[in-house]
Amino acid sequence: MGQRAPISSNAFCIGLEDIQKAALQIAGQVLRTPLLPSPQLSQITGAEVWVKYENLQATGSFKERGALVKLESLTEAERKRGVIAMSAGNHAQAVAYHAKRLGIPAVIVMPEPTPFVKVGNTEALGAEVVLAGELLVQAAEKAEQLAAERELTLIHPYNDPFVIAGQGTIALEVLEDGPSLDMLIIPIGGGGLIAGNAIAVKALKPEIEIVGVESAHYPSMYQAIRGESIECGGQTLAEGIAVKTPGTLTLPVVEALVSNIVLVDEDRLERAIALYLTHQKTMAEGAGAAGLAAMLAEPDRFKGKRVGLYLSGGNIDPPVLASIMLRSLERENKIISLRITIDDRPGILGAITTLLGEEHANILEVSHRRMFLDVPAKGLSVDFMIETKDAAHSAAVIARLEVEGFAVVRLKGSAGAEIDP
C-alpha cells in the first residue's frame, strides 16, 4: 500500500519480481483458476491443448487480477477519495467488485449504448455508473474529466504497471500447475494481459513461445508493431479485445517478446465459442475464445505442439450465445430448414410429418405459406425446421422426401432468407 514510484527499473515497465509481488497480494482474494487438459479440443486441433479457466473468476474474467493489484497500491487518502474506471464490460465489473470489497468508492463511466444488463451488473456491485458518449473514447474523456474534478484515481484497463503485473500472475500459475508447454496463445486488446504474461514466462521459461491473437476487425497491436497506420472498426464478437489504441507500456513488450500475432475472423470466433460450450461445457465470450479461434484459423502453426489457451472471460450475452449455438448446429447440419410445396388437400401435411418421424427427424418448427405468388393457387408452401444427427442423416431425410414425390428445397439459415438452387 502507498507505493507511488515506478515499480521496476527493468527494460520494461515491470519485471518478474513485480509479478511475483502481485501474486502474493492477490492470494486468497482472487481465484487460483485451474489449468486442465482438453482431449476433445486436442483431437479437433491436432495439438495437445491445455485451458486456463479465467472465466471462473467471481466476475467472470481475468480482469480482477490487475484491478485488485492497482487498488492495493493506493494510499489511504486515495482510497478515501475513490477511484474511477472507463469500461463497458469486464474491467468495470472487476474494479467495482474489488473496490466494494476494500471499501473504496468507485465510479464507472460507460458509453450510453451499453446494454442494461451490464449497467445493472456493475451497479449491483456497488459502483456509481455514469453513462457518457456513444463510443468508448468519449467515455474515456468523461472519465478523465471526472477524475480531475473529483480527485479520483483512474484505474486504466491495461496501460498501468500495477495492472500489467496483476495480469501476469496467470503465467506464474500456469508454469507451476501445468506440463512443459511449447506455446501460450493469449488474447490482445490493449496488451495488458499478454505483456504481463510474456514478461513472466520469458523470465522463467524463455523457451516457451508466446503467440498473440486479435480480432481481424481490431488489429491495432498487429498494425502498430509493423509501423502501419491503425485501421479498426466493425462489429465483432470479441468486443473485449476491440481496442483501437495499444498501450504505450505494453507495445514494447509485445514487440520484443511475442513471436507472432494471429488475426481471427468472426466465423472462427463463433466456432470457438460453440466448441467451448459443447466440448468443455463452459462459457467463453468472444475475447475469451480468441486463442482457440487462432488454432482453428492456422492449424498447421500449432499442430503437434503442447499449447496453453487462456480462456480469459466468459461474460457473453445469453441472446448472442443462443444465436451462436443455433448457427453452429446449422453449420454442422444438425438443424436444417426445408421448404416443400404441396397440393393443398387434407392429409398431405400429416403424410410429411409421418415421413419425418419414420426417418427419426425431430420437427422444431413448421410454418405455412399460402398467399405468395411463387406458390400455386391450389398449392401450399410449408417450411420445416428439423433436427437431425448429422449431415448424413440430413441427406437421408431429404432423399426420402424426394423419393416419396415431394419437391424439397434446402434453405440457408433458420430464417430461410436464402435458398440453395
Image (cartoon, rainbow, N blue to C red):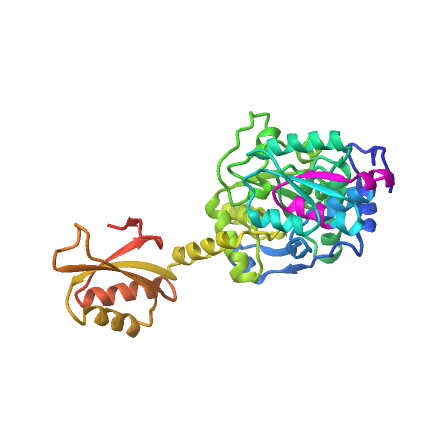
- Span shown in magenta: 74-97
Q: Quadrant of the N terminus?
A: top right
- Asked if residue 147 lies in the magenta stretch, the reply is no
Q: Is residue 367 left or right of residue 16?
A: left
Horizontal and vertical percent for residue 45? 53, 54
Q: Quadrant of residue 11?
A: top right
Horizontal and vertical percent for residue 150? 76, 33
Q: Is residue 229 left or right of residue 342?
A: right
Horizontal and vertical percent for residue 313? 62, 51
Residue found 18% across the figure and 69% down from its top: 348
Q: Quadrant of residue 222?
A: top right
Residue found 69% across the figure and 59% down from its top: 34
Quick one: 76 or 128, which is closer to the camera?
Answer: 128
- Asked if residue 91 lies in the magenta stretch, the reply is yes
User: Could you tell me if residue 157 is visible in this image?
Assistant: no
- 31 in relation to 348, above or below: above
